Amino acid sequence: MTSYSIPRETRRSRLTQRNIDYLRSVYKLGGKPGGCKVRISDLSKSLGVSASTVSIMVRRLEFKGLLDVEDNTGVCLTREGMKVLVEHLWKHGIIEVALLRAGVDEATAKEVADNMSTCMDSGTTEKLAKALGNPDRCPHGKRIPYPGEDLIGYDYCGL
């Protein structure tokens, strides 16, 4: 029997908002590539779900190449996971700016930006960013990271 593996691009393209929530929480808890590992119990508390639920999702994100998992020490983002998180934060920030400029209230803009950022492609986001004058700050004054940037600290739109 021939084994078949799904190409990483295909695996990555099936991300949900919940997947992004996990990546965001791992980052916020210090699980950067090459950095310290985040314990499953800490991730469970951060996300408000059971440790068994976290374990299942962590394994799925490991399969997608977004998390490194070590059974005894915890999890951290891979470089690919960090890249995906930065791209999400960029999309989120651009969409949020567009919605607020269009007159949508802040709470709705944040919620819609979270949802749209998982399904909007990068090309569309680039065009929207250009039409908005390539903003580098969200309406709350937080930085909007652009793809290829390293995240430094926690003061980013969407974190």
Image (cartoon, rainbow, N blue to C red):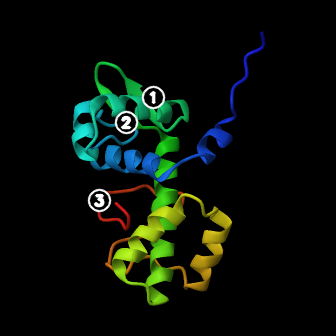
Nearer the observer: mark 1 or 2; the answer is 1
Which residue bears the numbered disc 1? 59
Residue occupying image coordinates x 39% and y 71%: 110
User: Marks 3 and 2: in contact by CB < 8 Å?
Assistant: no
Secondary-structure class at tag 1: helix
Which one is in front, 68 or 113?
Answer: 113
Side of 22 relative to 7 (left or right): left
Q: Amino acid at mark 1?
A: Arg
Compute the Cα span from label 3 to label 1.
25 Å
Nearer the observer: mark 3 or 1; the answer is 1
Secondary-structure class at tag 2: strand
Compute the Cα span from label 2 to label 3.
16 Å
* The residue positioned farthest toward the top in the image shown: 1
User: Marks 1 and 3: in contact by CB < 8 Å?
Assistant: no
Which residue bears the numbered disc 2? 76
Quarter of the image for residue 63 reads top right
Which residue bears the numbered disc 3? 154
**Quarter of the picture holding the C terminus:** bottom left
Side of 20 relative to 127 (left or right): left
